[in-house]
Every structure is written in structure tokens, then in C-alpha cells.
Image (tube, grey):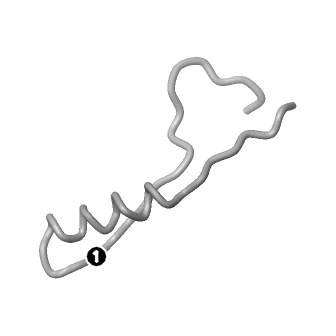
Amino acid sequence: KPRVEGHRRVAVTLARDVDVETARAKARRAAAAMQVSLDPL
């Protein structure tokens, strides 16, 4: 879409581990390592 009104999710991180809290921590670390850049139209 060339135009977005409101909020838009641009990325999702997923992780697996032996328990939910550890998997969530892994997913948060992965999300923190991502860099998002937008190209002007």
C-alpha cells in the first residue's frame, strides 16, 4: 500500500525454547536486533 493510516506491523519475530518465558526473551532479543528503514516514495 502506498499510504497507511493508523498503525501497521512491519515485522514479526518468532522463537522456540523449553518454556514460554525463555522463548519470549529470545524473541525480544531478536526484535531488538532488527533495524527497520523506510524508503521514500
Residue 32, image x, y percentages: 44, 55
Give the residue drawn at x 72%, y 23%.
3
Q: Which residue is labeled 1 in the image?
A: 16
Quadrant position of residue 19: bottom left
Q: Report crowding for label 1: few under 14, some 14 to 19, many 20 or more residues within 10 A (C-alpha).
A: few
User: Seen from this angle, which residue lies furthest top?
Assistant: 5
Quadrant where the C terminus sits is top right
Residue 35 drawn above or below residue 10: below
Give the residue drawn at x 43%, y 64%.
30
Quadrant position of residue 20: bottom left
Q: Left of 40 or right of it: where is 19?
A: left
Residue 28, image x, y percentages: 34, 58
Count of marks placed on residues: 1
Q: Secondary structure at mark 1?
A: loop
Give the residue drawn at x 62%, y 48%.
36
Residue 13, image x, y percentages: 43, 60
Along the viewing direction, whichever of 2 and 29 lies nearer the viewer: 29
Q: Left of 27 or right of it: where is 4?
A: right
Along the viewing direction, whichever of 7 and 35 lies nearer the viewer: 35
Give the residue drawn at x 83%, y 33%.
40
Q: Left of 8 or right of it: where is 25?
A: left
Quadrant where the N terminus sits is top right
User: Seen from this angle, which residue lies furthest bottom?
Assistant: 18
Amino acid residing under circle 1:
Arg
Residue 11, image x, y percentages: 52, 51
